[in-house]
Every structure is written in structure tokens, then in C-alpha cells.
Amino acid sequence: MYGNAAGGGGTEKRTARRKKVTAPALRARKGGRPIAMVTAYDFTMARLLDAGGVDALLVGDSLGMVVQGQTTTIPVTLDEVCYHTRAVARGAQYAHVVGDMPFMSFQVSPTQALESAGKLVKEGMAESVKLEGGEEVAEHVMRIVRAGIPVMGHVGLTPQSVHALGGFRVQGKDDDAAARIVEGAQALEQAGVYAIVLEAMPPDVAERVTEAVSVPTIGIGAGPHCDGQVLVCYDMLGMTLGHAPKFAKRFAELGEQVKGAAEAFVQQIEERSFPAPEHCYDANVKKGAKLSVV
Ligand code: KIV
């Protein structure tokens, strides 16, 4: 009875040739066709982004900030990520679905990391998992990968460590800090990740990391030299209110459209021009006949 958001349109021809994107297929894109990843948190958005041709949908713990309205990602729970990932997975016909491992769902031990990753795949329908950190989580990554679950790494600005980092700050600004990011990425590669997110670092640092590892790097606020890019869907769609980070290019202005639509809705209700006759059911229905509500 609710609208089906996937709609046909210009993407139909392209989708006819598309195959489901897998972790090995993303891994094979190193140095090749750049990877396009976007975050998604619900079924309708997942279907639209999937129809638009994105390679991967990340159910990020950013949901704590952009869906729940929290000031950090720290309060997000594994159950919450599972819930949103299930919804996204149902809408992702082709895009690879990555479930993000929230704060304290993996840091305690490799065993805890494996259990949480297993839950995200089993209950959340994730096709791979992402976790934040470098060398310090290499063992955790190894345990998950050995169990047959593909892992995406995440270095640079790791928002779950916001208090240790002193805020959401650009990372790798001096030689030592840049070297630590490179080493962290190499440790993740050794541990078996299939791709690594590079967040908030100068482009030359991201370029060094990209050259230093044999798996694709996917940048966010990390410049043009990565093997792919990721944005938060609401930033990408121009739905973010207030301050948005410099790197968050708006590919549409849906925020303005949503506001405009809400204003038109309110106005038409007040002036009683909605609903019009075409929005009303036919009164001429025979007794006992089934009502069609589509
Ligand atoms: O949680 C998230 O959305 C992320 C991306 C910003 C990479 O980790």
C-alpha cells in the first residue's frame, strides 16, 4: 500500500547488466574503476541508491548522528546497526552491503569482534563488516576474516576515538602521524581486509597509503588519490542542515525540496485543495466487492 521507491527510469538499462557486487569484486578494483560507496540506513534509501548504481552501501555507525541526532557515534549499539542493516540489505539488489561495527562491539577482544561480526552477518544480513583502527585491531580482523567474513578497515579519523583524538580532527598532519596511518593500513592489509576507508587526512597522505597497500582505499575527506570515495547519504543529497564538512559535496538539494514539499502540503491542507477528487476512492463500490487500495 505504500509507494515503491525504486521506480524505473533511466537506470533500467544499466541495472539489466549489473551483477551483485561482492567483497572480492571490490577488492579486485584496486587501481581500476573507482569504487562509489554511500551510507544508507533504511530500505527506501537503499533501493534508490542501488538503482542509481552505487557499488556499496555502508550502514555506518554515523546513524547515531544523522538518524538518531546524537553528537557522536559512541552510543550506537550492535542491535541498532543490525536493525538498520537488515532494512538496507532488503533494498540492495546489486550494491554490496557493509555493516559497521559500533563502539565496544569489537574492541574488547578478537573473540568479541568475531561474535559481533557474526551477528551482523547472521542477523543483520550484512555481506561484510567494517571496523575502525589500525595495528591495534589487526588480530581482531584476522579472527573475523578466518571465519569467512570479509572485513573493511578504517584509518585516519576514527570517530569512535573522538575523545582520545580531541575532537573530529584531520589526521596525519605531520610526518610521524602520517607514517602511523600508513603502518596501520599495512597492518590491516596483512590481517586480510579487502578494502580500507581513509577518513579526514591530507590528499598526499591518502596517496601514500593508497600506494603502500594492495587493497583498495576508499576516501572520505581524503582527496582524489584513493581507489574510491564514500559520503554520508544525507550530505551527498544536500539534506544536511547547519554545518557540513568541507569534503561533503552536495550532489542534490533534497533538503530544500523536502522543506518546499512540506510547505505545499501544509498550504493545500489549509486551503482544502488536497485531497482532490483524483485522490479519493470511488464511492460507487458494490457491496462485498474487494477494495483496491493501490
Ligand atoms: O559511519 C560511517 O558512516 C562511516 C563513514 C563516514 C566512512 O564510517
Image (cartoon, rainbow, N blue to C red):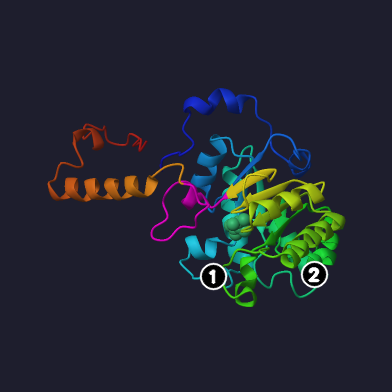
Viewer-closest of 170 and 289 = 170
- Residue 22 falls in image quadrant: top right
Crowding at mark 2 (Cα within 10 Å: few <14, some 14-19, many 20+): few
Horizontal and vertical percent for residue 112?
77, 71
Viewer-closest of 11 and 182 = 182
**Residue 294: mark:** none
Q: Is residue 237 magenta?
A: yes
- Residue 20 falls in image quadrant: top right
Q: Earlier in the sequence, mark 1 or mark 2?
A: 1
227 left or right of 114 in image: left
Crowding at mark 1 (Cα within 10 Å: few <14, some 14-19, many 20+): many
**Is the stretch drawn in magenta largely helix, strand or loop?**
loop
- Residue 121 falls in image quadrant: bottom right
Q: Secondary structure at mark 1?
A: loop
Q: Give the residue type at disc 1.
A: Thr
Residue bounds of the magenta highlight: 231-249
User: Quick check: is the Cβ at mark 1 less than 8 Å away from ligand 1?
Assistant: no
**Residue at the spot x=73%, y=62% of the render?**
178
Residue matched to label 1? 72
121 left or right of 14 in image: right
Horizontal and vertical percent for residue 293?
35, 38
Res 228 visible: yes
Quadrant where the N terminus lies? top left
Q: Give the residue type at disc 2.
A: Glu
Quadrant where the C terminus lies? top left
Residue matched to label 2? 136
**Residue at the spot x=81%, y=58% of the render?**
188
Viewer-closest of 226 and 22 = 226
Q: Is residue 100 magenta?
A: no
**Residue at the spot x=25%, y=37% of the render?**
279
Viewer-closest of 25 and 209 = 209
